[in-house]
Image (cartoon, helix red, strand yellow):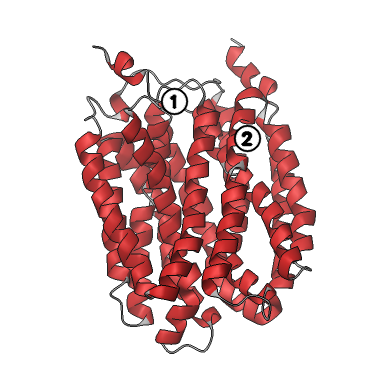
Amino acid sequence: MTTSTQAAPSLAGFPRVVSLLLNIGHGIDHMFLLIFATAVASIAIEFGYSSWTDLMPYSVGAFALFGLGALPAGRLGDLWGRRIMMIIFFAGIGAAALLVSLTQNAWQLAAALTLLGAFASIYHPVGIPMLVQNVSNPGAVIGINGLAGNLGIAVAALVTGLLVKWIGWRAAFAIPGAITVVCAIVFANLCPREVDTPSTRKGGKAKVTLSPAMLARVFLVMTAAAVASSLLFNFTTNGNAQLLSQGFLGVIEDPAVLGALLASIYTIASLAQIVVGRLIDSMPFKPLQLWMSVVQIPLLIFVAHTQDWGLFAALLVVMVFIFGSIPFTDAMIVRYVDDRLRSRVAGMRLTVSFGISSLAVWLLGPMVKGIGFSSALWIMAGIAAIKAAIVLLLPDEPAAAEPARVK
């Protein structure tokens, strides 16, 4: 039986259980990075801090390594093979979460979170290119994968809130960590071994062929837009738990209920990625991404001036567009870059965008403490405007492909 015959029933060229684990891996990746943001108030109390804003900067190492580690992770994914890197991802991030649960002070916590961020950096440049190998509908596959990633964010809000309330913040890291180590064992046993590595593999050509100059332009614009998107993503996903807590003060103060509200926002907003993924397969990137960037500007301003249930509704709508924008960059890499280079190109892009956007996590606590959530959200609206201007620099797709046809 040929490899292609074996792959036929699968969404992404793998047995269904492997494709499922690759999508679950995306959820785990985002979930683990946001457990701290949901549990930070409880951790701050145990470690003797008067406010969660004072402890938040200790998590910056996780997000810095999440970006900086993507470059070597992508290179190793192409050179060593993506299967072995995904096994390292599952086992490493699970073990790091268990280590976080054992920390006794802020600096130990910072070191353990940084290690967690290093393992978390593996997924995006390795797992997503692995998932879209040899698929005819990459936008739809990326949309489903994006849904899985953002459901991980929803699970972080819901499960962490429940575990913090009933067991404690340490369990919020330890229990998912142990489950993820089990996922590593299952993945290692069920994922077929690679005959050759992506860097030596034939096939997997880019959907649209660009000249080197046009490809460089697309990469620069794509990376700049990704930086802006990541800043918005990191600020909101790391700050929303405390934003809701502040907005519902005196109305709802139970962390489990607030976690459930935030989880519902993330779950509903995540569905936007399936819609956007399908649109990416059927229309040019530029007008779709531009429209979704422009809409975020007034929505973020509106969120800045609402409270309780109005805040809930406004935050839901803005997260639909922030989450819905996520598939663009990965889909562009599939469309313009050969598979043998995709992990390295994704790693370079992620190192820049996630490395810079980790500033949002570092600044979140001091910024909110100094100017408040309302002013901080106005700044985020300005970043959304900058992103829209950057997207205007993308070439129109028919024109982008034209230089490759000219001899």
Tell me the crowding category of disc 2: few under 14, some 14 to 19, or many 20 or more residues within 10 angstroms, Cα based: some
Q: Which dot, 1 or 2, sits closer to the camera? A: 2
Q: Nearer the viewer, residue 110 or 219?
A: 110
Image quarter of residue 381: bottom right
Residue designated by label 2: 275
Residue 124 in the image: state x and y as whole percent.
Answer: 43, 44
Residue 193 in the image: state x and y as whole percent.
Answer: 21, 30
Residue 338 has which mark?
Answer: 1
Residue 113 in the image: state x and y as whole percent.
Answer: 37, 67
Q: In the structure shown, which secondary structural element does the residue marked by tag 2 occupy?
A: helix
Q: How many marks?
A: 2
Q: Which image quarter holds the N terminus?
A: top left
Q: In the structure shown, which secondary structural element does the residue marked by tag 1 occupy?
A: loop
Tell me the crowding category of disc 1: few under 14, some 14 to 19, or many 20 or more residues within 10 angstroms, Cα based: many
Residue 342 shows up from this direction: yes
Which residue is rendered at x = 60% and y = 29% of the image? 278
